[in-house]
Image: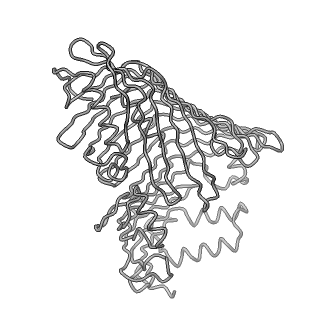
């Protein structure tokens, strides 16, 4: 939840819209800022006073409480002083005069065996934000802003639950519009940042000491959201269930480092990841969450005495992952999606020396692409902790799968290639096993090239026992038929509503 507080504070440094000609006063800007935080589910309180042309807001507290089955999780942030100064031409300057402190409290969870704990963080917002427009259509603009946040380690009875963290963003330039339309707040944002850094203090896990850091540069971000401000302050369910958000974040390049030092041999394992252009997109539309990430040229390096040859390198030309899932409840079917892609994965020579000592197989880069989609019916809003609590006590199934679709299945490795697609549906029948899935009917189409040859090569290299290789070839003969090209197999599989498996039009005897 500290990320929610951070996002609200960052909005003042990245708060896009067309220039407006009317004037705004410090009181107008303060009211707009307060309404925005309230609409995002926070409760706000503060002391206000005038110092000439400046409205001074002291002891601003914005907080949130989320009820969970084990008790309330609370987060409270305090900004000691904000200054809203009237500028010429009807503009207002907004500055955070002192750091923001955040305290989060999490109750004990007997089921997980975790104690109650409290975490603390401090955030400094540097730079000036200039606000223009009119009271119902404001534009926040900043140049050269910066944000630094540090959180202290969390320890309970001498045991560290969370390490300390430091986050920093510099060279922030951008605009943010905030438009009020009746009971709706609408916004667009567009910003750039020079560098984003994230570091984790050394911590001990299972006897090993871990250090980690991340750096990204050339950052750009765009987005928009529309939320109702007519709800109850602190109502997270109303915010997530009724809001519409669409954000895209890009980075030019990034790097990650991690060092793991063992407790016994004191020998470090160093992991370095360098990544090219990276894209991240998140949307939330009336309870349906979609997440997509992609990265180019991911270069992973491993070094340490645990690695054969002391070091190894793994290169992924492109990585992509995606998720769509309904967070809200609905009587209608809702979409879900899961996607993963690892394009042109180049293994290090030491890996091929171990996997293919006799050089039997092609050492071409490997590729994996998989996408699974379909529909489900959800009886629960996953952002509503009261509904989750009732679900746990009643023990009912919250999500019922309806349809499944595989738009793409692709794997190329060591000279072999498998591609396919499929779809199906779950039948309106009781599960064969209590708590399991309902019966399923569907089809799967597969094309296999070079798979029989790969099985032979694996057997010749000793990686696959001869008996296992023979069984695999027999299974291919049962489920697939020869294709048009040499060393090609095709398979049309069907699972009927009666539970019969049909391969290439022939029912199988099981």
Residue 74 in picture, x, y percent from top left: 48, 46
Residue 361 in picture, x, y percent from top left: 63, 55
In front of the other: 355 or 433: 433
| Identity of the residue drawn at 66% across and 62% down | 458
In screen coordinates, is 62 left or right of 268?
Answer: left
In front of the other: 106 or 396: 106
Q: Which of the 4 quarters of the picture holds residue 424? A: bottom left
Residue that sits furthest to the right in the current view: 265
When the figure is inspected, residue 508 is found, relative to residue 96, above or below; the finding is below
Total marks in image? 0
* Coloring applied to the structure: one colour
| Identity of the residue drawn at 49% across and 52% down | 72
Residue 490 in picture, x, y percent from top left: 45, 70
When the figure is inspected, residue 77 is found, relative to residue 474, above or below; the finding is above
| Identity of the residue drawn at 22% across and 43% down | 184
In screen coordinates, is 277 left or right of 255?
Answer: left
In front of the other: 42 or 427: 42
In front of the other: 462 or 2: 2
Residue 256 in picture, x, y percent from top left: 59, 35
| Identity of the residue drawn at 49% across and 34% down | 276
Q: Which of the 4 quarters of the picture holds residue 33? A: top left
């Amino acid at each position: 939840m500290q990320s929610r507080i951070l996002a609200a504070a960052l909005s003042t440094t990245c708060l896009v819209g067309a220039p407006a000609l009317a004037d705004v006063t410090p009181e107008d800007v303060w009211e707009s800022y307060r309404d925005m935080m309230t609409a995002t589910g926070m409760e706000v309180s503060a002391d206000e006073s005038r110092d000439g042309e400046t409205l001074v807001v002291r002891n601003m507290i914005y907080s949130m409480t989320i009820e969970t089955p084990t008790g309330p999780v609370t987060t409270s942030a305090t900004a000691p002083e904000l200054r809203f100064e009237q500028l010429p031409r009807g503009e207002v300057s907004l500055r955070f005069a002192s750091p923001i402190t955040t305290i989060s409290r999490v109750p004990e969870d007997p089921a997980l065996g975790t104690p109650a704990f409290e975490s603390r963080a401090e955030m400094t917002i540097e730079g000036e934000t200039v606000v223009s427009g009119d009271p119902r259509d404001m534009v926040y603009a900043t140049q050269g802003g910066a944000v630094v946040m540090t959180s202290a380690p969390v320890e309970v009875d001498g045991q560290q639950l969370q390490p300390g963290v430091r986050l920093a963003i510099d060279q922030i330039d951008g605009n943010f519009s905030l438009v009020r339309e009746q009971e709706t707040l609408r916004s667009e944002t567009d910003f750039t940042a020079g560098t984003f850094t994230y570091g984790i203090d050394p911590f001990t896990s299972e006897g090993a000491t871990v250090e980690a850091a991340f750096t990204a540069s050339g950052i750009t971000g765009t987005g928009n959201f529309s939320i109702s401000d007519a709800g109850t302050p602190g109502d997270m369910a109303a915010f997530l269930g009724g809001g519409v958000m669409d954000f895209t974040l890009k980075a030019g390049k990034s790097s990650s480092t991690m060092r793991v030092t063992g407790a016994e041999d004191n020998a470090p394992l160093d992991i370095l990841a360098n990544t090219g252009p990276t894209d991240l997109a998140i949307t939330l539309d009336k309870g349906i969450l979609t997440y997509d990430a992609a990265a180019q040229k991911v270069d992973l390096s491993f070094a340490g005495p645990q690695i054969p040859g002391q070091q190894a390198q793994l290169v992924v030309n492109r990585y992509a992952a995606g998720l769509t899932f309904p967070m809200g409840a609905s009587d209608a079917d809702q979409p879900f999606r899961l996607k993963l892609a690892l394009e042109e994965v180049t293994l290090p020579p030491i890996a091929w020396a171990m996997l293919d000592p006799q050089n039997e197989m092609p050492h071409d880069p490997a590729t994996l692409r998989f996408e699974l989609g379909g529909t489900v019916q959800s009886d629960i809003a996953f952002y509503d902790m009261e509904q989750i609590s009732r679900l746990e006590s009643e023990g009912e199934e919250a999500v019922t799968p309806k349809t499944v679709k595989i738009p793409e299945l692709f794997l190329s490795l060591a000279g072999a290639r498998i591609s396919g697609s499929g779809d199906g549906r779950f039948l309106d029948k009781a599960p064969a096993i209590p708590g399991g899935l309902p019966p399923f009917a569907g089809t799967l189409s597969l094309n296999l090239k070079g798979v029989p040859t790969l099985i032979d090569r694996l057997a010749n290299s000793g990686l696959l026992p001869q008996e296992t290789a023979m069984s695999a070839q027999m299974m291919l003969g049962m489920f697939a038929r020869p294709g048009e090209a040499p060393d090609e197999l095709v398979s049309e599989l069907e699972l009927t509503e009666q539970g019969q498996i049909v391969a290439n039009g022939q029912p199988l005897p099981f």
